[in-house]
Amino acid sequence: MTNALRAAAAILAAIWFVAVVPAEARDKVKVGFIGPLTGGVSANGLGGRNSADLAVRLRNADAKAKYEYELVVLDDECKPNVAVQAATKMAAEKDIIAAATHYCSSTAIATVDVYHKFGLPVVVWGAVLPDITYRNKYPEVHRVNGTMINQNETNAELLTRLGYKTFAVIHDTTDYGKGHNEYFSAALAKRGGKIVGTFGVGADQQDFTAELTQIKALNPEVIYFGGLTPIGVRIRAQMDKLGIKAVFDGTSGIVSDAYIQGLGPLAEGTLAFREGAPVEKLPGGKFFMEKYTAQKYDNPPEAYGAFAFAAMDLILDSIEKVGPDRRKVIDDLANVKNRDSIIGKITFDDHGQNTVSVITKYVVQDGKWVVWEDSEYASGKRKLPRQK
Amino acid sequence: MTPLLEARSLTRRFGGVVALGQLDLEVAPNEILGLIGPNGSGKTTFFNVVTGIYRAEAGTLSLEGNDITRASPRVIYHAGISRTFQRSRLALPLSVFDNIMIGNHKRLNQGLWFNLMKRNAFKREFEASYRAARALIEVFEPWLAERMFEPVAGMTMIDRRRIEICRALISQPKLLLLDEPSAGMTHDETKTLMDEILQVRAHSPNLTIIIVEHEMGVIERITDRCVVLNFGLKIAEGPYRQVAADPQVQEAYLGVA
Amino acid sequence: MDIGLLAQYIMNGLMVGMMYALVAVGFTLFFGVLDVIQFAHGDVLTVGAFTALMTFVGIRTAGVHSGSIALLAMVIVAIFATAGLGMLIARYLVLPLRAAPALNTLLITLMLGTVLRESVRLFYPQGANPKPFPALLPANSINFGNFNLRLDNAIMLAAGAAVIVGVEFLFNRTKLGLAIRAVAQDEETARTMGINFVAIVLVAFAIGSGLAAFAGVMNGFYYNEINFGMGLYLGVVGFAAAIIGGLGSIYGAILGGFLFAALQTIGTVALPFASAYKDVFAFAVIIIFMAWRPTGLIREKISERV
Amino acid sequence: MSEGREKSRAPLLPGVIALALASLYLSALLAVEKQSLIIGLLALAVIVALGAYWMGWLASVSQSFADRENILGALAIVAAFAVAAYFHDDHFVLLLIVTVLLYTVATLGLNIQFGYAGVLNFAGASFFGIGAYTAAVLNARTAVPPLVVLLIGGIIAALIGSLLLLPVLRTRGHYAALVTIAFALLLKAFLEVSDVLGGPQGLQVKGMTVGGWSFNDNIELGKIELSFYMSYFVLSLALLVCAFILVRRLERSWIGLNLDALRLDETAASCFGLDVARWKITAFTLGNFLIGVAGALFGMVGGFVAPNNYTFADSLILVSILLLGGVGNPWGLAVATVIVIVVPEKLQTIQEYRFLLYAVMVIAVLLFRPEGLLPRPLRSYFPGWRP
C-alpha cells in the first residue's frame, strides 16, 4: 500500500512543480478596480466598472501602448468589511500595480490603511468623504472626484434661497452619512436654516415608520437625507405612506437611475447634488459617451462613470510613463498637475485630492435627473412641496 | 435496627391519576425486596421518586434515618442509591468502560486542574478504575471484560443489561434498584443474569436490592420479601409464597372479581 | 403623547404584528405535527414573495394591465407554489430525519434556509439587489391629525385577519383540522384512528408555508420592496413569536406575533435613542423571557419517559 | 475492531505518509493559480480520498493517528512550518493559512460546547466578534500589551456568554437554539447602532506587537524578505496547538466523559451524580473563551472589524465546519476548515456560490453521513494505551 501512496505523492509533486513554474508574459500588466458590483448601489458600481474597463480597452487598442493591461475587478458590496477583504486581496497580489477604488465612502475610508500598509497606489473614483484623503497623508491614496463639503454648501444655499426654514435630517450611520450630516448642518447653520430633528438610521434598515412618524409630528418643510439609493428609496416611499408632505433633499448618494426606477412617479421633485459637471457638459463628455455606447455595456455609466474612466486613465498614463512598479507609480502620481482628462484638468494637492469646485444641482422631473437650472422647477413652471 | 430505606405515606399523582398513594415501605439492610404489581401500579414511579427524578407530593423518604425526600438525583446517588432503567439507558456510542465509569462518578476526581494538568496522577486513577471495572465485569462475563473498549451500540441485550448493572454497582452503593432486569430477554438469558446477580451479591454481602420484575420465577427465586402494589397502593407484603397466595393479589393480577 | 401619533404607532405595530403572527402560525403548526422546527420557514417566505413578483412580471409581459387580476394571480400563485415547496421540504428533508436527533432536523432546515436564500440571490436576475414591489392596492388615505390611515394598509390588515380567522376555523371546525390536532396530540393514537400520518404532515406543511407566502406578499405590498434577506429576519422573529406563545399552540403563536410587534413599538417609542435599538430591546426581552418561561407562555407539556 | 484488541501499537508510517501527502497537496493547491489545474487537483483529492477509503488505508491512517498522536502532532507542526516557509513572501496565501488556523481554533471551542456537551451555540461568530471588538477597543484606547488583549478577548467573550447561561441552562433543544440565535441578532443589531463601537462603519484594529516589535512590518532575514503575516502565522499556530492540546486532554479525561454523558442522556447522567449545570457552564464558558481568543487575534490580523463580519450566516459556517469535519474530532475540524476556507478562495468560479455550496454539503452530510467526513473515534484516554 505504501508504494501506492508514494505513487500518488509522485503525481502530486509533479503537478506541484508544473504549477510553481512562473508563466507570465513580460508585456502583461495587471491593474485593479474595486466597486459595489452587488447590493443596493450596484448600478453605480457596474457603471464605474464598465468605464474603467473602457479605459483599459482603449489603451490596449492603442498601438503606442508599451504594455498590455489586464483589469482585475473585485466587489466591495458597499460594505466596509467586504471592502477590507477585497482591498487586502488586491494589495497582497504583487503583480497588481495600481487600482481605481470605491464608490462608497464607508468602504473607501475603511480601506485606506490597507493600501498604505501594502503600498498599493489607488485613485478613488466615487467616494466623497473628505477624510479619505484628508484624515491621513498617505502617498498611496488619491481621488479624482471632489468631496462632500462643497455639495452641502450648495445644497444649503439653494434650499434657503427657495425660502425653506425648517429641516429634519436623516442620515445613515456610516461615515458617509455622518459626514453629510456634519457638513450640511454646518452649512445650514451659516444660512439660518433650522434643524428640527436629526435621525441616524441603519445602512440596511427596512422600516422607517418610527423615525418618520416622529418627523411627521415635527412637521419640517424639508427632509434632508444623507445616505445612498437603497434606503433613500425606502424612506421616500414610506414618507408617502405616512402622508408626509415635504421636500426630499438628497445627496450625491442618490444620483442614480436606480433611485428613479425604485420609486417611479414618487421620485418627482427629489433634489440631489453632485460635484463635477454633468457628463454632457464635461470637456471629454461627448467622446466618453460615444466610446461607452460603442462598447454596448448593459448598464449606463451612471453618475460617476466619467470619474472612474478618468481615474483608470490616469493610472495607465503613469504606468506607461514610469513602468509597472508600485513605488514609481506613487511617485509619479504625487506630482500630477493640470493633467488633461475627460473631466477637465486634474491637479492633486499634497493629500492626493483633486480640486473639483463645480457642483451640479439635480432635480427629478418626469422620471429623469434634470440639471436644476434647466428644470421647470427653476423656471417656476412647477413648484416643490410647500414652496412659497 | 433502623431500616436502610424507609418510605412514609409517600404520594405522587399525575394529573388525576394516583401513581403512589400514601405508600409505607421499609427495606431492611442486606435484603432483596421484590416490588411487584400489574402495569401502571406505580413500581417505576416509586423508583423515580426514590432517585429524585420525580418529586414526592407528600410523605417522607429516609435513607439510614436521614431524610432524602426533597433531595436531587445527584445527592441521592452520592448518598448511596443507584439504579438501572426499565428501557436500557446506556450511552450507546461510548465504550463499555466509559459507560461503567459514568456510574463511578463519585469515586473519580472531577477537578478541572487534576483532569487537565495532572496527567500522571490521572493515569494512575484511570488504571485503578480500569482494574476495578474489569474485576466487576468478570463476575458477570469474563469475555465481556475483553471488550471493555468497544462501543455498547454493538452489544446484545443481555450484555447491555450486564453493563447497566455494572454501571450501577461500580460505585459500591448501599442500595441497588433494578427496574425489570429481565425485560426484553429470553427465559434462559434471564436465568443466567439472575445467577450473576446472586454471585455479585455473594461478593458484596451488605448490598441491599429492590427489584421490580414481572417474571414471578425471578421474584420467587431471588427475593427475601415482596411488596405488591396496585394503583399506587400497597395491597400485600411478605415472602413471595405468602403474597402469591393472597386473594387480593390474585385479583389484582388476574382481575378475578 | 398626541393621540394621532399614538394611533399611528399602533397602526404600524398592527401591520408588522400581523406578518409576524402569520409566520409564527407556520412554526407552531410544524412543531405541532412533527415536533420539529422548520428553520427554513423564513426563507420559504422569501421564495413566496419573489414568486409573486415573478408572477407580476409575467402577467405584465403577457400584456394584462388590470391591477386586480395581477394582484389575485400573485397571491394565488405565490401561495400554491410555496405550499408545494413546503410539502417537498417535509417529504424529503424533515420526515427522513425523524429517527435522527432533533438537532439534525434543526440544522438541515437551517442549511436549507441558506440554500433558498442564496438561490434567490444568485439565480433571480440581479437577486442581490432589493427589488421594487408593485403597489397594486388603492393608495387613498385619510388624515386624522397626525394619524394617516391608508386604504391599502386597512385592506391588508383585514385580509390578514380574515386569513387567521380562516385558519382558526379550519382547525377547530373541520375534519382536517381535527385530524391535524389528533396527530399533534399523539401520533400513535392518530394512526390507530386510521389517519394517514404522512398525508396530514404534508398538509400541515402546505398550509404553514402558504401562510408564509401570504405574509411575504403582504410584506412586499407594505414596503413596496423585497430582498433576498427578508426571510431570515422574519423567520427568526416568527420563531421567537411562536416560542413566546408556546410552540404547538395556534393562539399562542398569534398572540406571540403581536406581542413581539408591541415590544418593538414600545422599544421605538420608549427608548430615547435610535429606533434601530428596538431589535436589541426586543431580542433582549426574548432572551430574558426564555430564562423566565423556558417553554413559552402557553406551556408545552414535556413528558419524559423514564 | 481487530486493531483495537491487539496489544501492539499501530504502525507510525501510514500517519506520516498521510501527513506528508496532505501538506504537499495543500501547498500545491495554494500555489496553483490556473483554474483548470485547481479543479484537477480537487478532483484528484476526491479520487485519492475515496480510493484510500475503499482500500482501507484511511482506517490504518486513523489508527496510527489514534495510537501515535503525540509524534504525528509534532510532525504536523513541522509540516505547517514547511508549507508556510515555502510561501514565506506571499501575503495572501499566508493570510489564508492564518485564517484556517484561527477558524480551527474557533471551531474547537464550538466543538466543546456542541460536540461534547451538546450545548447548542448558533452565535459562534458573535463570540468571535466580541473577541475582535475587544481587541479593537483595547489596542486603540489602552496600553494593555496585545498578548494580554488576546486573553481578555477570550474572557470578555466568556463573560458576555455567561449572560446567556440562565436561559441556556433552563431551556432544551429548540428553545436553547432560539436563545443563541436571538443573541446573534441582538449583538449585530447592537453593534450596528452603537456609536462607541463604530456602528455599521466598524473599527480599525491595531496590529499585534510583542515587546515593541510590530507584527505588521515585513521581516528581513539577510537576503530573503518574509511577509508580515509570517509572525501572525507563528502566533496563530501556537494558539492552535494550545487549543488542540486543551481540547484533547479535556476529551480524554473524566470531564470529557461527563460531557458525553450529559449530551447523550441528561436524566441518566444526573442519576449517577453528574452536576448538569456545572458541566454545561464549564463547556459553554470554555468554548466561548477559545472562540473569543481566536476572534481577538483574527481581528488584529484583518486590522478591521465591522458588524457585518459577524452575522448569523457566519455562525452557521462555523457550525457547518463542525458537522462537515465530524463532530467531536479535532483532526476532522482541521480538514473541514481547509475545505470551507481555502477551496472557495482558490476556485474563483465558485467564490460567489460558496454559502450555497456549504449549505448543500452540510445537507448531504446530514442525510447520508451524519457523523461527518472523519467520524469521531472511541475515546482512548491515553493514545496507544493497552490494558
Image (cartoon, rainbow, N blue to C red):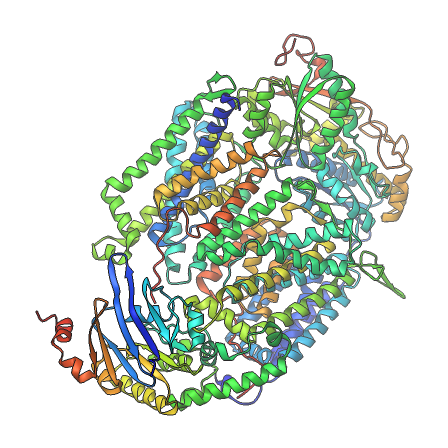
Can you give x and y, in whole percent of width and height, for residue A248 in the image?
Answer: 63, 21
Q: Is residue A267 visible?
A: no
**Residue at (62, 50) in percent of width and height:** D310
Q: Is residue C273 visible?
A: yes
Is residue D151 toward the left or the right of residue C239 in the image?
Answer: right
- Of residues C223 and B232, the one nearer the viewer is B232
**Residue at (59, 65) in percent of width and height:** D333
Q: Quadrant of residue A183?
A: top right
Can you give x and y, in whole percent of width and height, for residue D204 in the image?
Answer: 74, 47
- Of residues D277 and A69, the one nearer the viewer is D277
Can you give x and y, in whole percent of width and height, for residue B172 in the image?
Answer: 43, 83
Q: Quadrant of residue D89?
A: bottom right
Can you give x and y, in whole percent of width and height, for residue D211 in the image?
Answer: 84, 62
- Of residues A225 and A28, the one nearer the viewer is A225
Whether residue B238 is situated above or below residue C197 in the rendered picture: below
Residue found at the very far front of the displayed protein: B1
Is residue B159 toward the left or the right of residue A161 in the image?
Answer: left
